[in-house]
Image (cartoon, rainbow, N blue to C red):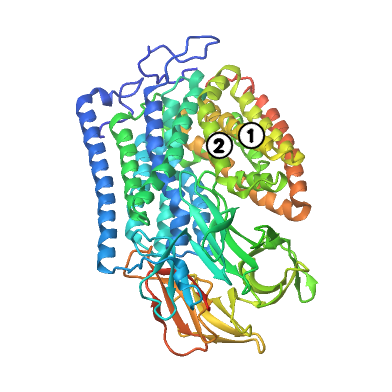
Amino acid sequence: MTYPSLRERRTRAPATRQASRPTAPVARTVVLLGITSLFTDVSSEMVAAVLPLYLVLQLGFTPLQFGIVDGLYEGVTTLVRLAGGYVADRWRRHKEVAAGGYALSAACKLGLVAAGGAWGAVAGIIALDRTGKGIRTAPRDAMISFSTPPADLGRAFGVHRALDTTGAMLGPLVAFVILAIVPGAFDSVFVTSFCAAVIGLGVLLLFVDNPARQAAVPPAAAAAGPGMPPRAVARLLAVPRVRALVVAGAVLALATVSDGFVYLTLQRRASLQVGFFPLLAVGVALVYMLLAAPVGRLADRVGRGLVLLGGHLLLLVVYAALLAGASGVVVVAVTLGLLGAYYAATDGVLAALASAALPAYARSSGLALVASGTALARLAGSVLFGAVWAVWGLQGAVAGFLAGQLAAIAVAALVLGRHGEVLGRAGPAPG
Amino acid sequence: MPGRRLADPPSGTLPATGRRPRRRVLLFAALCTACVVVAGGYLALAAQRARDVRAAAPVAVQAAAPASLDGRPRLLFRSTALDSTYGKLALVPLSRPDGPRVMTQLDCDRVYMAAGRGLCLAADRGVITTYTAVLFGPDFAPRHRLPIPGLPSRARLSPDGRLAAMTVFVTGHSYAGGAFSTRTSIVDTDSGRPLLDDLERLTVLRDGRRWRRADFNFWGVTFVPGGDRFYATLASGGRTWLLEGDLRSRSARVLRGNVECPSISPDGTRLAYKRRMPGIRVTWRLHVLDLATMTDTPLAETRSVDDQVEWLDDRQLLYSLADGDRPTAVTDTWVVPAGGGGSPRILAHAAFSPAVQRG
């Protein structure tokens, strides 16, 4: 097992797992990528926060048009994510591909200023913005994994996600301060958003190093020439441990009720005032931000698969609370805490699990594969929930997803357990 | 970064930051400074531009109390003039609709008023944007505040002021994402309590039979004078229908297709509405439907209008459109004959969401 050691400011000792060891500081690259994400999220969330206001109240978009634009968000990301992941692996240019994605999204903020009220142009720019997000995600996560010893991956992703979420919470604040100064100055919001994105991009370009790797090509492909053939990505699915992660991630996501439906159910079951809606989302983000790093570290210690499954067990409690329809305040508090903890225990932890299972030469392709499988399953789960709701009613749909989530956890435990992922016995992947 | 290939040192990262780290820090400091200057400068420019627009096309305000217009035919609307009145509810006498305005202290994104009762839908912009429906009295003082679940879209009252209907877009929040839907409710203006908290609870009949779909969306209520009947839009599967509803029986029947945001004439004989035109681009043309004969008349306004129109009288219609030459925040109120023919003209500049008070 010759996992490429990519630790910074550490000795060149091979990064093998140790049962107990002193905690090393989080890698510089992880923190820097986190800061890049923080600024980028300030940039994108300040636009996202005012976009409904801008499109509907300012440009006079209709619900229908708004729906089309919103739908563009989802579909584009998945396709491009796979392409971005592959290109980064193929030419071993993770930093450059990620930077391209960040730069594209930054440019789109200026595009919004230039587009004015032309709705076709606005829709196209938003799609491009999402393209940028799709491109950068997998190479960036791969860079996090390359700069972290395998034993510390959970914490590294946790720290990154905490910084990322901090930016997401600051963004709307910045946007509305600007609109309070000059009413209707949406172009000023977009220009400021562009500047925040440029600072994030600057951190990446100036201070983050492109990871160099040993054994960066699969042995079989090495003879054929530099880089990785597209076939190698498909072949990843033939690797049992990788396939197990894709399947587990997708199955768990399929039986997950999307946040929007959770809030809607809360509102109906617990007679919550509708004004609480956005407050719920902020509460969840806050808990996620606070818990991401400690829960990631916990995952490194007790087993990432265990924490991932534990996160989904928390969802069971959320669904049970929704079914019980207990008094408003209790349900709200429980939901905020549990949903935030669920995100902390799943998002970064799944990336850590995947990073440890994926060979270095196909790291970002594989991360994109796992993330896309999860995203598509989540989308399908959303449609499924709507359909079940129509047939069985809201109560029935939540009950159905409670049962489904339980079954998914069982399946995921089985699949992951077979590869020793649950208790973290699995060693690092062959490089 | 040339030369960063596989042949580079075998372990660890390339010490790119090790090479002249000082220069990189300085470069980053310069970048941050430039960004702050650009963002701050642009904001200052936007503030200056807003002042210029105000100076170039001043909207006169008269220092009078709203009560000074009591009893006279008047128009009320949301001011979209880029000055301190932006977003506030304003009043003008119908005899001089583009003349000096009387301002109220209410901030509204959508507003309506009838028989001394008013409905103001407002976005409370902040770190967390929340939305409120304010029911106010003849003195423009709030009587009831109700939280609403999304962006204000349509506001209407029954001619007697007893019933208020509101439509909002329930959008995915930036953290949550997700699809859009509308939510329409009808409240009692006296008590502030909902009579129908969601039109989804209506029993919908189509060709005499119960019709149910999970993707039903309702919007744009208009109340029939005297009584509990109303018209509204029902959408499902990307198409829209005209609904005739009854509040007492909580039922509604589908009348016909492709009618959005109906608005009933003061005499109760016609509905003005926006009709979706064929094509990839979403555009609407204003039409008037005669309820006795169910015949349509297209109006002289050829631009796409996305608004629930207001009847100035039984012969003329009001609606809001953004001015293409000015910042998008500025919306004017236009008037067009209701019988077809004629041509549209601006009734009041920088005015949005008009509501006519006939006395």
Q: Nearer the viewer, residue B278 or A81?
A: B278
Residue bearing mark 1:
A333
Rendered position, B280 above or below A99: below
A220 with respect to A339 (left or right):
left
Q: Residue B159: in sight, yes or no?
A: yes
Instruction: Give the amino acid type for the residue marked by disc 1 in the picture.
Output: Ala
Q: Amino acid at mark 2?
A: Gly
Disc 2, SS: helix
Q: Position of residue A132 (x, y in %)?
A: 41, 46
Q: Residue at x 59, y 24 (%)?
A: A304
Chain to which the residue tagged by mark 1 belongs: A
Q: On the same chain: label 2 and label 1?
A: yes
Quarter of the image where one finds residue A266 = top right
Q: From where the camera sits, is residue A225 visible?
A: no
Q: Which mark is residue A283?
A: 2
Is residue B359 left or right of A97 when viewed as pictured?
Answer: right
Q: Up-down: is A430 above or below B155?
A: above
Task: Please give the chain letter of the residue carrying mark 2.
Answer: A
Residue B226 appears in which quarter of the rendering? bottom right
Identify which residue is drawn at 45% across, 34% down: A166
Q: Quadrant of residue A63?
A: bottom right
- Give percent across and percent down for residue A205: 30, 35
Above or below, B57 relative to B125: below
The alpha-carbon separation of the residues under discs 2 and 1 comes to 9 Å
